[in-house]
Image (cartoon, rainbow, N blue to C red):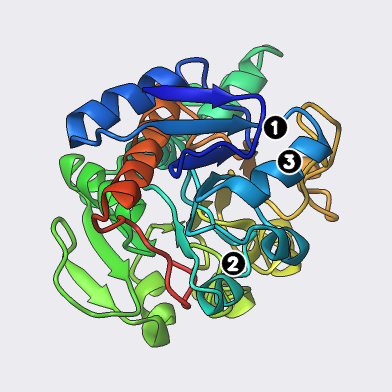
Amino acid sequence: MVKIWKIYGGAFVNKVGILLPPPGNVVEMFEKVKKAEGLEEEISILLSRSEKEKQEILKESVALIMSSISLDDLDVAKNLKLVQVPFAGVDTFNVKELIKRGIILANVHSNATAVAEYAFGLLISLAKDFIRSDRDLRRGYWHGWMGKEPNMEIEGKTVTIIGLGSIGRKIAEFAKAFGMYVVGVKKNLQNYPNVDEVYGTEDLLKAVEKAHFVISALPLTDETESLIDRNVFNAMKGKYFINVGRGLVVNEEDLFVALKNHVLKGAAIDTWWNYPEKPLQFAQPSKYPFFALDNVMMTAHAAGFSEESVKRNWEDSVRNIVKLFLGKEVENIITERGY
């Protein structure tokens, strides 16, 4: 049985605090996974409706589903064993502090297909110049054969994928299906399916020089912050850049200058440096006027947000928590590296 608790301090051991808006069927998810995994004990779900309830949830919970946690919150959470993130990014957490306190931090990679599809959609849009064609034809101006402006075929072209995690590997799979040559960049060198060559991060410039398209699928860590800078863009002269990783892995000013000065032929950016404080609020995504450039596509950190991926993210998060209660190994544990 799964209970949603309104009064705290009960006898149940398996208490899960949810400090994010959960899907409407979250109780059913727990029931289904609990049955599939063979957990007979009850689970209590604790939902927060106020700051006071949040503090009680922090005190009671063995596992928390949340997007960040402060040091003050950690001091309250004396029973906490697992922080489960229902998406991939964990750069909002103090990973070393959690490890120091013996608390597991885990994420999910259930949106890999959604992000990879989106990244590849951006790549095709750049190659075929969809945005400019749509925008200008609305005003009666014709590109394509009438304007003597051919588009690019991607078959036989090279794509360099920076970051070969679950998303990067899925992008490679799609690229191979389109007949592309795939170069990967990864700190740990090994063979990967659908990847023709792999370079270490120390050879990043060599890897991007080979490409017609460069896609960043990097998480944000101390090692990756501002990794992609003017040196990388200068090595990519006349090529396309796509970012579906994290905004801060790219030097903001260097990217703007590279686009403004047409060092890059074009870019498609889904992850940024500035975000609204709350959903649906207004905020420019950068302190630089990317919106004024005609060689950049801008999307609002939407790559991983598909109907299917949100469902998988929560299902896999629930499964991880049930595994914790069963004493099984939790999946996707974040290490001190930040992934």
Q: Position of residue 224 (x, y in %)?
A: 54, 74
Q: Nearer the viewer, residue 286 or 15?
A: 15
How many marks do you count on the picture?
3
According to the image, label 1 marks what residue? 48
**Amino acid under disc 3:** Lys
Query: Could one spot residue 204 in this view of the protein?
Result: yes
According to the image, label 2 marks what residue? 249
Q: Nearer the viewer, residue 67 or 151?
A: 67
Q: What quarter of the picture does the C terminus occupy?
A: bottom left
Disc 2 or 1, which lies upstream in sequence?
Answer: 1
Q: Are marks 2 and 3 in contact (CB under 8 Å)?
A: no
Q: Are marks 3 and 1 in contact (CB under 8 Å)?
A: yes
CA distance separating discs 2 and 3: 33 Å
Alpha-carbon neighbours of circle 2 within 10 Å: few (<14), some, or many (≥20)? many
- SS for dot 1: loop
Which numbered tag is attached to residue 54?
3
In terms of image quadrants, where is residue 260? bottom right
